[in-house]
Image (tube, rainbow, N blue to C red):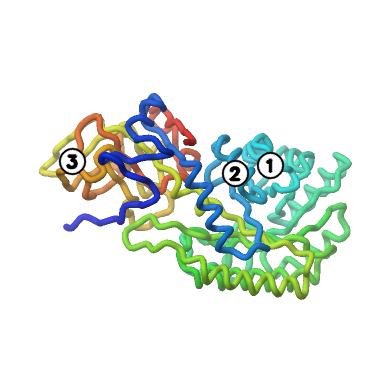
């Protein structure tokens, strides 16, 4: 069987056959970190990605960072100066955003099943709460009264449409997210009798999408839906968060998202808002797209092992640190992330090898029969596209191995 072929990510330089990150050779960075495995995020690449995004999009669009993609505190602090707001999905993420220095007025809190403690913290902080149900709306109103604070709220809508060709569906079906589109008018009518300040809507219908036409279509539907439902709202529509869904290429054959068609549709949406609802701010909520390609996961080969003619590189990292790279975080059919031997990027000798971790399970597979430079014990394995959904999306305590470190360089 032919090994799957990735196009090597070009965002990182290579010198003397060694990957460079943040101006440092990978071998030196590993010495600086002091141990493997670790995640490393390149601040320059994050800054460049956001600058490129802003230059491609119409100037009236605000960009929010979805902290769940990567809540590393140092990275969150970097983001404060680069984006217009942050979106959080737990009390811990709320604390992270506030500690990073993001203004409470620029933080929104979404997610089903928020606890009373989380809601009280959010109301006391003065952040925008995205309501996921009528019951949550009633709880927020009661908490606001108990604190003598009038909470700011938006309604998260579960629309009747979906983001087509999406890697993760978050709208257009029976879901735990948001209020079904048809039930929103009645909820808004009830809201008008509660001590709540309505600001707008949140419509997030899919994630990890590489189809610009699908994204543009869903965004156009979202804007029209927001304007239609605004007629039932107890106050003017000040904010319309239409989610994101922008994907990044992970697998062979994936093509980077073309922003031009998306930007063209956003231009039309801004023109429509300017004509009929000029006070409305249009927000894109992006996580993975801003950080995924700026990060790598690094582990070290402990042993080179042969089994029935197959090469296995047994490393000190794996599923417990990087669940997504092993194919166990949403993949239906397992496919390899781009992987390389970081200190032998070209390598004078190539081979087909599998990269595995130290866990006692066959699921601990970082690369399956992938063409790599021939590696020996001590070499550094790099998993690219690892800046999003890494440590916090992985079962770090599984089998009791040490956690991976994180650095921003």
Check if mark 1's residue and mark 3's residue have beta carbons within 8 Å: no
| Image coordinates for residue 58, horizontal then vertical, percent | 62, 65
Check if mark 2's residue and mark 1's residue have beta carbons within 8 Å: yes
Residue 323 figure quarter:
top left
| Image coordinates for residue 389, horizontal then vertical, percent | 48, 45
Residue at the spot of label 2: 79
The earlier-in-sequence mark between 2 and 1 is: 2
Q: Callout 1: helix, strand or loop?
A: loop
Inter-mark Cα distance, 2 to 1: 9 Å
| Image coordinates for residue 294, horizontal then vertical, percent | 45, 46
Residue at 49% over, 44% down: 44
Pick the front one: 359 or 385: 385
Residue at the spot of label 3: 374
Pick the front one: 202 or 382: 382
Residue at the spot of label 1: 102
Answer with left or right where residue 14 lies relative to residue 225. left
Inter-mark Cα distance, 2 to 3: 38 Å
Residue 62, compared with residue 160, is above or below; it is above
Crowd tier of the residue under label 1, counting other residues whose Cα lies within 10 Å: few below 14, some 14–19, many 20 or above: many
- Residue reaching furthest left? 309
Residue at 57% over, 72% down: 264
The earlier-in-sequence mark between 1 and 3 is: 1
Instruction: Tell me if I can see residue 224 in this picture.
Output: yes
Classify the position of the N terminus by image quarter.
bottom left
Residue at 42% over, 45% down: 386
Pick the front one: 187 or 324: 324
């Amino acid at each position: 069987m032919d090994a799957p072929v990735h196009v090597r990510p070009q965002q990182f330089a290579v010198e003397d056959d060694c990957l460079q990150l943040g101006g440092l050779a990978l071998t030196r960075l590993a010495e600086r970190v002091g141990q493997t495995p670790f995640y490393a995020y390149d601040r320059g690449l994050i800054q460049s990605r956001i600058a490129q995004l802003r230059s491609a999009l119409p100037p009236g669009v605000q960009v929010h960072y979805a902290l769940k993609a990567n809540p590393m505190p140092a990275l969150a602090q970097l983001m404060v100066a680069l984006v217009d707001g942050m979106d959080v999905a737990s009390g811990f993420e709320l604390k992270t955003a506030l500690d990073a220095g993001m203004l409470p007025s620029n933080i929104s809190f979404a997610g089903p099943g928020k606890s009373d403690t989380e809601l009280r913290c959010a109301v006391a902080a003065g952040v925008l709460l995205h309501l996921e149900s009528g019951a949550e709306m009633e709880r927020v109103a009661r908490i606001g009264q108990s604190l003598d604070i009038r909470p700011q709220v938006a309604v998260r809508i579960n629309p009747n449409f979906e983001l087509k060709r999406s890697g993760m569906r978050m709208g257009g079906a029976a879901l735990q997210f948001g209020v079904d589109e048809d039930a929103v008018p009645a909820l808004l009518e009830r809201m008008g009798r509660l001590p709540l300040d309505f600001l707008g809507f949140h419509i997030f219908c899919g994630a990890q999408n590489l189809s610009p036409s699908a994204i543009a279509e869903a965004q156009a539907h979202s804007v029209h839906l927001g304007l239609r439902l605004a007629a039932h709202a107890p106050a003017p529509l000040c904010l319309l968060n239409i989610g994101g869904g922008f994907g990044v290429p992970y697998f062979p054959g994936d093509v980077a998202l073309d922003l031009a068609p998306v930007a063209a549709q956003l231009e039309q949406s801004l023109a429509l808002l300017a004509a009929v609802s000029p006070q409305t701010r249009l927000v894109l909520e992006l996580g993975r797209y801003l950080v995924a390609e700026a990060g790598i996961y690094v582990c070290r080969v402990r042993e080179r092992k042969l089994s029935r003619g197959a090469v296995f590189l047994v490393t000190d990292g794996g599923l417990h640190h990087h669940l997504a790279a092993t194919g166990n975080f949403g993949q239906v059919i397992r496919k390899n992330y781009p992987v390389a031997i970081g200190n032998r990027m070209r390598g004078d000798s190539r081979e087909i090898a599998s990269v595995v971790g130290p866990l006692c399970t066959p699921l601990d597979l970082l690369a399956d029969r992938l063409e790599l430079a021939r590696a020996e014990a001590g070499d550094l394995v790099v998993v690219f596209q690892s800046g999003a959904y890494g440590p916090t999306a992985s079962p770090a305590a599984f089998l009791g191995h040490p956690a991976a470190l994180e650095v921003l360089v």
